[in-house]
Amino acid sequence: MFRSVDYLLRPQSIAIIGASDSSRGGWAQEIYDNLEYSGFPTRLYLVNPKRTEVWGRPVHPNFASIPEPVDLALTIIPSAAIPDALAEGAAHGLKCALIYAAQFGEGGDAEGGKRARALSALSETYGLRISGPNCMGSLALREKLLLYPAKRVRSLSPGSVGVVFQSGGTFQFWLQQAALRGLDFSYAVSSGNELDLDLADYISFLVDDPHTKIIACMAEGIRRPQAFMVAAAKALAAKKPIALVKVGRSERGKAAAVSHTGAIASNDSVFDAVCRKYGVLRCPSLDDLLETCLALSQGRLPKDNRIAMVCYSGGAKGLVLDYAQDEKAEMAPLSAETRAKLAGMIDVGLEPENPLDVGANIGVQAPKFAEICRFIAADPTVDMITVQALVPMSPADPYDLEPLRSVFDSTDKPVLGFGRISQNATDTSRRYQADTGVPFIHGLPETVRAMQGLARYAATLRRGVTELAGPRGSAANLSGEAFDKLLATHGLTAPKSAMTKTADEAAAQALRIGFPVAVKIVSPQASHKTEVGGVTLGLRDENSVQAAAESMGRRLTAYDPKARIDGFLVQEMVSGVEMILGVREDPQFGPFMLIGFGGVTAEVMRDVAVRLLPVDEKTAREMIFSLRGVPLLKEFRGRPPRDIEAVVKAAVGMSKLFADHRPWLSDIEINPLIVLGEGQGARAVDVRVVPRI
């Protein structure tokens, strides 16, 4: 499944194809200079049929003239010449090629597409590994291989963060800024178009590398979704967190109109569910990617998700509370004993609560402030702590490690320093960060999100990954009475109902079921029944039922003269909170579940949670309580609480039902799922099944 990256990042021999010291050879010159700066860490060959010597070195006209098969070719020649050059190289044992040039099919370019297909054929025929095209190279810091056309990468140091960016230009600037903040790197790859080697291959390599502890990625697309999930699971098992920024949050699934589930759940929300399952920390920005990596670099993870924050600013306290609400972060309540003792330690008039403002008088007393921080860090309700840190910026600033270092040494919980806004970083501030062991996070919302990331990753490690079991069902279960029984045995209880052929039969069955009832038309042309007038509610006698059925039949025929009317469904009326529950097969990542509020207005409200299957009780409950509308399920304005456990049971049941019948289903949806009072269950009012084609 994974293709080897070794010849790209650990080659023993390199050839620069297009070596030239002319004005047009800028990138080749930059890369050569970087290799010279590093002392030529590998055997180096220069290739150019038009030259015999460049940079005081002999130049080979082709691969055949090189005395050994080459591990890695750096192709710095026009796009049109690359396929033939690499074909000759592959025929003489070339193992890997790094292609900097573009024009390999981007934007639908036909000629570029031909070149891309030619390279793919070389890869398949010879096993030639290809990095790029349309990239800006790679860095192997311990091996001193700076294969990036810029001198600025020389300032980077070996460390524990592995980096993969599909964007080459963004790549160098993020590395530069991250290094200024104190991060160091094992390997860094600008992966480009990923014609061959892709994100999954690079992640797998970084997981296997003993020096890499954290993996930072920027992805514009996932080329091999299944391989990506395997790589993410591999990283989780190795306890190497992946932090990732993904471009394209607004992308929609291709089958958006098939069902409410498809219309609401975009490709991005499904990818977010993938990240949740495998512990990939999705970051909303490149700044957050940096701050999250810094938070992870301490190597500590919380035992739960409760955050404590200590500062000497009322404004910072208020902002953190706002950001915690935005991010649904849980602030530690602090024990009664802690609150009582804090009352005598902070400025008079301030509340001994979390977040804690100790007051300006205490804040300037570093030993006293540190004592308070240690005390809060020891509180059993606290799982991680962030403290306002006055960081020395120049050699002239006071450089006292003891207060902050004492907080770090007093606990095994994560301890982060924070600044209220972004600020400069200097040699002094980086050294202080390293000496105290406490990462300094820039910005209050970034601090809250970084700590939430620590909590989510730790929770995923504790939970582990449960993969989907193989199917155990039968196609025969998905129709007629067998399907009704299947739903009932999976916690998906339907209202009393009857399927009828005619309006007269509908009236008779309504009398048997008991009034009031709802009548719905059954037709392939009425998948969204309300849009064609195919639902009538609250009917209280036989005549009303018959008239409603006849009327909706006429409306559908007027809407679509070719519509086929299979009959009418008569159901008992139930009232409660309307929800939507659906499972759908995503073509890239597999089946996912959607839970949300709204019934017929689900697409408008978009108050939903999405997770990959399987969904267990804990996951279902987490999904429900993540919804904005969850107060509707609790006691509300004198109305008794709804049966949340029935929704949990229905979600778990639908997950198992779909998994068992996956070969025959592409989509199953209950909309609405009516949630009754506590202990009274829920009713699957409208069940829609889309068979797999």
Image (cartoon, grey):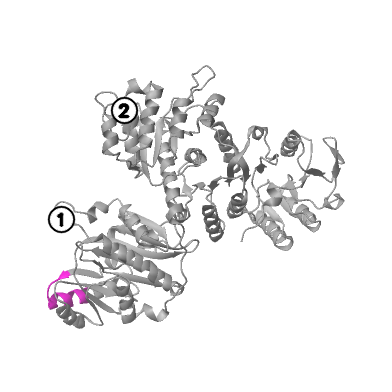
Query: Residue 533, which numbered label?
Result: none
What SS does tag 1 mark?
Answer: loop
Query: Quick one: 341 or 32, which is closer to the camera?
Result: 341
What SS does tag 2 mark?
Answer: helix
Q: Report which quarter residue 136 is drawn in.
A: top right
Residue 547 colored in magenta in the image: yes
Eye-nearest disc, 2 or 1: 2
Using residue 224 as the reference point, say whether residue 614 is left or right of it: left
Residue under circle 1? 639
Separation of marks 2 and 1 at Cα, in angstroms: 38 Å
Residue under circle 2? 314
Residue drawn at point x = 61 percent, y = 54 percent: 201
Q: Report which quarter residue 344 is drawn in.
A: top left
- Look at the picture and state if 220 lies above or below 423: below
Q: Position of residue 496 (x, y in %)?
A: 21, 75
Identity of the amino acid at label 2? Answer: Gly
- Look at the picture and state if 284 lies above or below 582: above
Identity of the amino acid at label 1? Answer: Arg
Magenta residues, as a range?
Answer: 538-551
Q: Dot 1 surroundings within 10 Å: few (below 14), some, or many (20 or more)?
A: few
Total numbered badges shown on the rendered structure: 2
Q: Name the quadrant of the N terminus.
A: bottom right
Query: Quick one: 88 or 209, which is closer to the camera?
Result: 209
Query: Quick one: 20 or 90, which is closer to the camera?
Result: 90
- Look at the picture and state if 672 lies above or below 563: above
Which tag, 2 or 1, sits closer to the chain's start? 2
Residue 179 colored in magenta in the image: no
Q: Position of residue 577 (x, y in %)?
A: 23, 60
Q: Determine if residue 82 is in view.
A: yes
